[in-house]
Amino acid sequence: MPNLSKHPILRQIHELIAAIEVCGASPELTRAVCLASALYEPAEALVDSKVAFLDVTQEPPLDSDEAIERQIRASGADVAPRVTKEHIDSLVADLVIKTHHFPGTTSTMAVAALPDGYVVATGYSGCISPENFKAHIGIGIAADNAIAAARSKLWELEGYVLRASLHKPRAVYAGGIMASDAEFVGGSMTTSD
């Protein structure tokens, strides 16, 4: 008797056999019970192989840049300008990480900045029990958290820049203000209206 809890179909075969047996005894009913019983082995093998198949080849969830990139390319959604994983990877590789452990605490902060000093994101780590605190572990966790937050923020920022350049191709950035159809005279901006 197979393990009926593996899959509902195995339970259904068991119920089918029981329903046939209740009908009484005849050569036809005995043959039906034998045919239904013969379904156990191939059904259980199919259930086992399907479970093994799912465990081995199931696509990873879309929680990684690599998995998302594969899906984008496979679906043909990479024909127009877009921010790519490779671009974000190059920005992340250039991040400057600075960490600070606050003396007398188990708290560590990390700052992820672009090479020009622009702070993209911060990360934090803290240990509950001072007896368990190890500065190098706290620094590593805070830095990892800052890098993960920076990666996420860079997707957002680079997406904004690309969208702005596609929406207003002649736009320029001056002093933190996006100006289009503007002239710069003596360091100040004037519009052509």
Image (cartoon, rainbow, N blue to C red):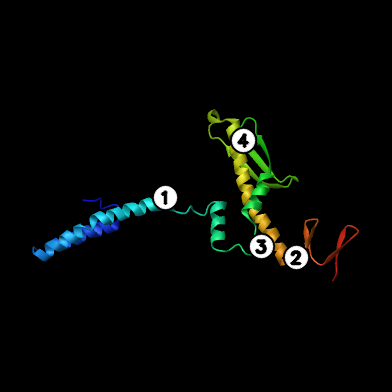
* Residue named by callout 3: 81
Q: Nearer the viewer, residue 168 or 176?
A: 168
Q: Nearer the viewer, residue 149 or 52?
A: 52
Residues under numbered marks 4 and 2 in contact, where contact means CB atoms less than 8 Å apart: no
In the orientation shown, which residue stands out farthest toward the top?
A: 131
Q: Nearer the viewer, residue 39 or 179?
A: 39
- Mark 1 against mark 2, which lies toward the viewer? 1
Q: Which mark is residue 82?
A: none
Relative to 130, 159 lies left or right: right
What is the C-alpha distance between the residues marked 1 and 3? 34 Å
Three-letter amino acid code at disc 4?
Answer: Ile
Element assignment for label 2: loop
Q: Which mark is residue 56?
A: 1
Three-letter amino acid code at disc 1?
Answer: Val
Q: Residues within 10 Å of mark 2 (few under 14, many from 20)?
A: few
What is the C-alpha distance between the residues marked 4 and 2? 42 Å
Residue 180 appears in the figure: yes
Q: Residues within 10 Å of mark 3 (few under 14, many from 20)?
A: few
Q: Which mark is residue 169?
A: 2
Q: Which quadrant would the C terminus be assigned to in this image?
A: bottom right
What is the C-alpha distance between the residues marked 3 and 4? 37 Å
Measuring from the top left, give residue 143's x and y in whole percent: 62, 40
Labels 1 and 2: the sequence-earlier one: 1
Q: Which mark is residue 139?
A: 4
